[in-house]
């Protein structure tokens, strides 16, 4: 696995309270992995909660998403209704409603593709030469079912070439915080015995799953030219990231959603 690298951290123009992580590998494309800092939400959602699926105030989430859109230089974000699938939506305009899918691709300038996460992998893709971008939500189920490979294929359908694609996995849960059951591990081993390398023994005798390493494996299996992980763990930095698993361990009622965006 490629060693985690230090991302550039900047602030969007006129929105200095927002923290936006960017990857040097995607320097040719406007993008950002937004942390929870800044935003209008309060309480357990404090900060930039961008998930209308949460029980946060609708007005607060709407304001947060508007701030993200402004930071990306667009009037609206393109998103999908995420269902932990391998389905990819090809878009050429801002749709009236969100389709049920877990990835988006486009070759249309001016569209900002967005993905929500709270431990799962947000993955941003770009073939700068072809002018094709993508964004994917890849939890363990979506990754196992092939959402990352499907995103690459959909980009190729728009003229991209896998070898030219750069894919960056943003903040997600790290292996040290991702304890799973033996049946979970067994499902990966049934797919491929070599997948055992993505598991390690945990302190409680249960396996620890390396989600970003598996994501990098899937991306390389799809033939992408460059695949990296930013190295940020959502579980381990509560002041910067929302985390479904941390919320569960703390017994909190709900959790916020982080947003990651890319545009041509």
Image (cartoon, rainbow, N blue to C red):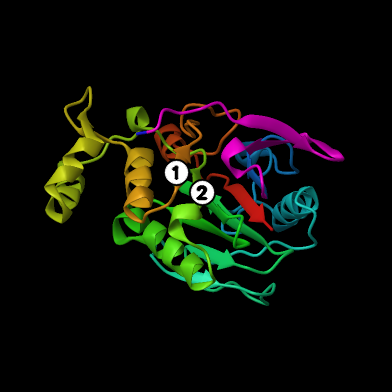
Residue 14 among magenta residues: yes
SS at mark 2 in the image: strand
Residue at the right extreme, as displayed: 14
Residue 92 among magenta residues: no
Residue sitting at x 37%, y 46% = 215
Foreground pick, 161 / 254: 161
Q: Tell me the distance, in whole angstroms, between the alpha carbons under discs 1 and 2.
A: 6 Å
Instruction: Give the crowd class for mark 2: few <14, some 14-19, many >=20 residues within 10 Å.
Output: many
Q: Are marks 1 and 2 in contact (CB under 8 Å)?
A: yes
The residue segment tinted magenta is 2-29
Q: Where is residue 67 in the image (x, y as percent from the top left)?
A: 78, 49
Q: In this view, does 226 lie to the left or right of 126?
A: left
Label 2: which residue? Answer: 166
Residue at the top extreme, as displayed: 203
Foreground pick, 248 / 37: 37
Image quadrant for the C terminus? bottom right
Residue sitting at x 21%, y 30% = 200
Label 1: which residue? Answer: 227
Q: Where is residue 206 in the image (x, y as percent from the top left)?
A: 19, 32
Q: Which quarter of the figure has residue 79?
A: bottom right
Q: In this view, does 192 lie to the left or right of 198?
A: left
> What label does residue 122 carry, if any?
none
Residue sitting at x 70%, y 43% = 41
């Amino acid at each position: 696995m490629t060693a985690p690298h230090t991302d550039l951290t900047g602030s969007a123009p006129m929105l200095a309270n927002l923290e936006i992580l960017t990857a040097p590998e995607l320097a040719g494309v406007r993008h950002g992995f937004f942390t929870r800092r800044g935003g209008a939400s309060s309480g357990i959602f404090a900060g930039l909660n961008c998930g209308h699926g949460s029980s946060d105030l609708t007005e607060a989430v709407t304001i947060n998403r508007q701030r993200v859109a402004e930071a990306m230089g667009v009037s609206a974000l393109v998103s999908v209704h995420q269902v932990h699938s391998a389905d990819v939506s090809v878009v050429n305009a801002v749709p009236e409603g969100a389709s049920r899918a877990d990835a988006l691709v486009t070759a249309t300038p001016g569209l900002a593709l967005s993905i929500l996460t709270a431990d799962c992998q947000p993955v941003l893709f770009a073939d700068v030469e072809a002018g094709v971008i993508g964004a994917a939500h890849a939890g363990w189920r979506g990754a196992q079912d092939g959402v990352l490979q499907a995103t690459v294929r959909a980009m190729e359908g728009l003229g991209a070439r896998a070898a030219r694609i750069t894919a960056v996995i943003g903040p997600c849960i790290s292996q040290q915080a991702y304890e799973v059951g033996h049946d979970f591990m067994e499902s990966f081993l049934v797919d491929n015995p070599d997948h055992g390398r993505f598991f390690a023994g945990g302190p409680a005798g249960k396996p620890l799953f390396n989600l970003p390493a598996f994501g990098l494996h899937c991306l390389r299996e799809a033939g992408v030219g460059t695949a990296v992980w930013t190295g940020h763990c959502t579980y381990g930095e509560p002041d910067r990231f929302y985390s479904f698993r941390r919320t569960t361990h703390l017994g909190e009622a709900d959790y916020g959603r982080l947003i990651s965006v890319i545009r041509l």
